[in-house]
Image (spheres, rainbow, N blue to C red):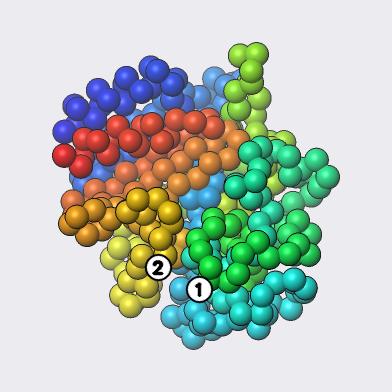
Amino acid sequence: MKSNILNRIASIQEEFNFSGSVLVKEDNNILIELSHGFANRSEQILNSTQTKFGIASGCKLFTAIAICQLVETGELSFDAKLEDCLDELFPYFDKEITIHHLLTHTSGIPDYFDEEVMQDFEELWVKKPMYLIRTLEDFLPLFQDKPMKLKAGERFHYNNAGYILLGLIVERASKLEFSKYIEENIFKKAQMYNSGYFEFDSLPKHTALGYIALPNGKWKTNIYSLPVKGGSDGGAFVTVNDMSNLWDSLIHNQLLDEKHTKMLLTPHVRTGEQNGFYGYGVWIDKNEDGIFKFHIMGYDPGVSFHSAFYPKTSIKTVVCSNKSQGAFDIMSEIEEVISH
């Protein structure tokens, strides 16, 4: 299996010039651990398994875990109404929107970046510069006064704004800044010692810069393409080993009790993809034998990320890239081997 995976990764790396790190583990046994490309092209600093990569929307899972922790301790309820959880005004939002709706992308609220409408994430920062976005409240003017897109509960519609609201709910319920809550209650408990919500203008060592390819063959970094600091809808940085530790801690009920772990990993809503479902902050694929994988993914300018846990084999895969494409192709090749 190992040599087969390595051969497939090598061919993809050659075709796409993959830049990033890859980890495949079966229980605690490392099958694949490798890195390609540069974390910093200007200084020619190589990527390694110690490199911290942005994972974009991959960290919606962290937000969902935080909400479930607060439900477990009685601070929140999945049926709690949005208007009862936050003091901010959302004049056109449905009064029946619940935390469950927000977790499952079924709230119907408008998104600040609607992937059904917009293609270029950088368009967002023309009127509101990205260097002004440092807190969750800073996102609110981008969507809070817009009309509903759908009726609450009508259907799955992937929504970043909903996870911004969940982050604000975490802050109100815990009385902690969102990133501080995640670092204290998830990263530390899961032994994710190299992960964090870092600001672009003060990145720690061993952090990869994200790179965007330009039509003329040149490149630029993504520091002017994303908010200065990630939040509850995306933007944390992790190492591949930290992400593997997260799966271990989640699956073994070290972040949530068994009841709430099961609730997070329950296929709550169909996504529209064949055999595709969404739990709380996690994508779920089924096959004829039941659940094939739990997985998370993230895409931003200069970021591509995929990670999965396969319950039948206890295999964990993590693919982090500091380019806009590449992680999906690597992940697909790995999955082709481990699923046969």
Percent of width and height locating residue 267: 36, 65
Q: What residue is shown with label 1?
A: 100
Image quadrant containing the N terminus: top left
The quarter holding residue 171 reads bottom right
Percent of width and height locating residue 318: 37, 43
Between 305 and 96, the one nearer to me in the picture: 96
Q: Secondary structure at mark 2?
A: loop
Going 36% across and 54% down the picture, which residue do you hit? 276
Label 2: few (<14), some or many (≥20) within 10 Å? Answer: some
Left or right: residue 279 compared with residue 314: right
Left or right: residue 250 compared with residue 199: left
Residues at circles 2 and 1 in contact by the CB criterion of under 8 Å: yes
Q: Earlier in the sequence, mark 2 or mark 1?
A: 1
Going 76% across and 43% down the picture, which residue do you hit? 125
Q: Secondary structure at mark 1?
A: helix
Percent of width and height locating residue 224: 72, 36
Q: What residue is shown with label 2?
A: 268
Which of the labelled discs sits on residue 318, or is there none? none
Left or right: residue 3 compared with residue 282: left
